Amino acid sequence: MSWGFFSVCHIISLVFAIGIIVSLYYILKSKSDKTKTLVLGILSFAGILAIIFNLIKWGSPIEYLPFHLCSLNAMVLPVAVFTKNKVLNNLLLLWAIGAFCALVINSAQAGFEIFSWTFVFYYFPHVLELGIPILMFALGLVKKDLRCIMSTLGITIGSYTIIHFINVLLNSYIAKNNLLDWAGNLIEVNYMYSIRPENPVLQLFYNLIPHSYWYMYLAFVVIAIYLGAVYAPEIIKAIKLKKQKQA
């Protein structure tokens, strides 16, 4: 049975993903902080295992380097969990959205058989990359900090910019060495989608700004709005405190 794109199977898998995250919350909420950290920390390595799996499985490592947002999430997540670093955990509240999008907009993976290893190493790491950053806050292991909004935006835009230049350099190397994929086509890497859109949502941005790299800045506008919503209670509290001091 294939996963499908908004098929019955796909929708059930999304509901199941929510069930996994909610179940982890109720299982861990009465445990000690040490136990919470240990369990989430062990689970956080799922994304790194997925990176290794993809590098080996597809026989084309240059196309599966850990430069997509979810891969960055996967590499940062264990550090964030075990150190409880404020900046990293607040950052992952944003980066977790990449995992959410990967689960929902799964058109490129719709053909995966749900009992295959390719599905397992795609689905479960993304569920955990979405759920663990949320659980870190929901379980009281870390706290949202309004001051981290700027570091979150800065790190994200900086990472995107660096990876865009990596894309340009890799594609230049690929063209010079005529590296072909399994179908005999010239490989083109497109990490963090800085070269071109690969799903309907990003295509809308590209239609408005039809230029590599720059078109994704429309996504950063959406990101800023999202962060405003996530930190709305903290923003309101900060405004009230400021007014009280001025009174």
Image: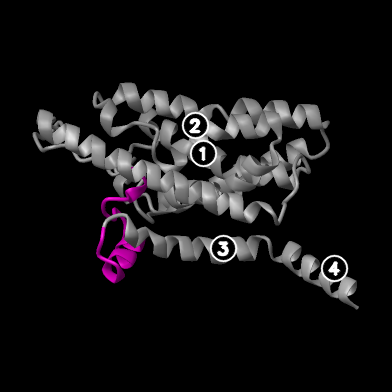
Residue at 45% over, 52% down: 101
Label 1 to label 4: alpha-carbon separation: 34 Å
- Discs 4, 2 touching: Cβ within 8 Å: no
Which of pointers 1 and 2 lies earlier in the amino acid sequence? 2
For this orientation, the residue located farthest to the front is 246
User: Is 209 colored magenta in this rendering?
Assistant: yes
What amino acid does circle 2 point to?
Gly
Instruction: Give the magenta-colored segment's residue range.
Output: 191-211
Which of pointers 1 and 4 lies earlier in the amino acid sequence? 1
Mark 1 — residue? 73
- Discs 3, 1 touching: Cβ within 8 Å: no
In the displayed structure, 213 sits above or below 125; it is below
Q: Nearer the viewer, residue 219 or 127?
A: 219
- Discs 1, 2 touching: Cβ within 8 Å: yes
In the shown orientation, is residue 43 left or right of residue 158?
Answer: right
Mark 3 — residue? 226
Mark 4 — residue? 241
